């Protein structure tokens, strides 16, 4: 098995780190843009222990996504050899493709949600149930596209930490999605129940 090494490893590290910076930098810019539109912050502070733990989980994912490439160095990076089946030059193009697909999908979600976009649950701002664009088939497509990007990082840097980050993200996203569904079900009632029946949580339902 031909392993990743040398200059290619440097490129992979740079791509993963840059994708994390661009993605979460984009979230910050989106939050600022929405704040100007609605006149208040859309990224509501966590209100209880459960939400604080979820925010801690997200912080670990973000830190690992951006920081891991800075820790891996040298042509024989020990971490990469722990997953030799994926430590191959052929995973470079698919990894890049997943990063691009995931980010493009996220921008699609932003466009579909418009001023309704929020980070935290907004108990005063859910006036419309977004059902267009990617939301026509998936209830939480932003989380889905984050997973797509993290799968790309696994292909580019196939380490135990990369796998751990995607698993942690999935756990956090599942809890957060459940909280959001409970809130939206209470706000929109039968409309949301019908929407939930015809959509998937993270993958499309046809």
Image (cartoon, rainbow, N blue to C red):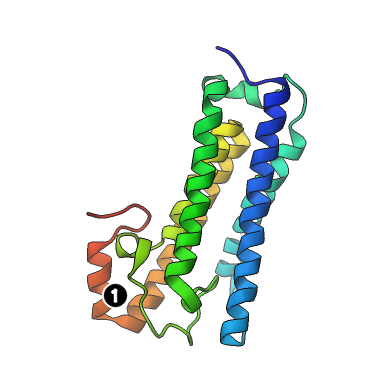
User: 175 or 144, which lies in front?
Assistant: 144
Residue 165 image point, x, y percent: 58, 44
Which image quarter holds the C terminus?
bottom left
- Disc 1 secondary structure class: helix
User: 157 or 121, which lies in front?
Assistant: 157
User: 9 or 160, which lies in front?
Assistant: 9
For the point 69% across and 35% down, which residue is it?
13
Picture quadrant of residue 42: bottom right
Does 180 sit above or below residue 149? below
Q: Residue furthest top?
A: 1
Picture quadrant of residue 188: bottom left
In the figure, is residue 55 to the left or right of 6?
left
Which image quarter holds the N terminus?
top right
Residue 130 seen in the figure: yes
For the point 47% across and 85% down, which residue is it?
125
Residue 179 seen in the figure: no
Does 88 sit above or below residue 186? above
Residue 193 image point, x, y percent: 25, 73
Say how many tags the image has. 1
Q: Which residue is mark 1?
A: 192
In the figure, is residue 132 to the left or right of 101?
left
Residue 78 image point, x, y percent: 70, 23
Q: Mark 1, residues whose alpha carbon is within 10 Å: few (<14), some, or many (≥20)? A: some
For the point 65% across and 54% down, which residue is it?
22
User: 29 or 47, which lies in front?
Assistant: 29
For the point 35% across and 58% down, which residue is it?
201
């Amino acid at each position: 098995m031909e392993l990743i090494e040398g200059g290619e490893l440097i490129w992979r590290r740079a791509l993963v780190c840059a994708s994390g910076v661009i993605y979460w930098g984009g979230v910050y810019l989106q939050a600022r843009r929405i704040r100007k539109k609605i006149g208040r912050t859309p990224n509501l502070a966590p209100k209880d222990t459960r939400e604080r733990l979820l925010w801690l989980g997200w912080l670990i994912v973000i830190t690992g996504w951006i920081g891991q490439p800075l820790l891996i160095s040298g042509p024989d990076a020990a971490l990469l050899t722990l997953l030799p089946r994926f430590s191959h030059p052929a995973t470079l193009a698919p990894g890049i493709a997943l990063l691009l697909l995931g980010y493009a999908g996220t921008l699609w979600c932003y466009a579909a949600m418009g001023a309704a976009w929020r980070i935290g649950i907004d108990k005063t701002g859910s006036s419309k149930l977004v059902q267009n664009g990617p939301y026509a088939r998936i209830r939480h497509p932003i989380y889905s596209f984050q997973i797509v990007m993290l799968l790309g990082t696994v292909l580019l840097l196939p380490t135990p930490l990369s796998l751990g980050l995607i698993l942690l993200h999935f756990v956090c996203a599942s809890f957060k999605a459940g909280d959001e569904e409970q809130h939206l079900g209470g706000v929109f009632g039968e409309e949301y129940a019908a929407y939930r029946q015809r959509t998937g949580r993270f993958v499309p339902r046809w």
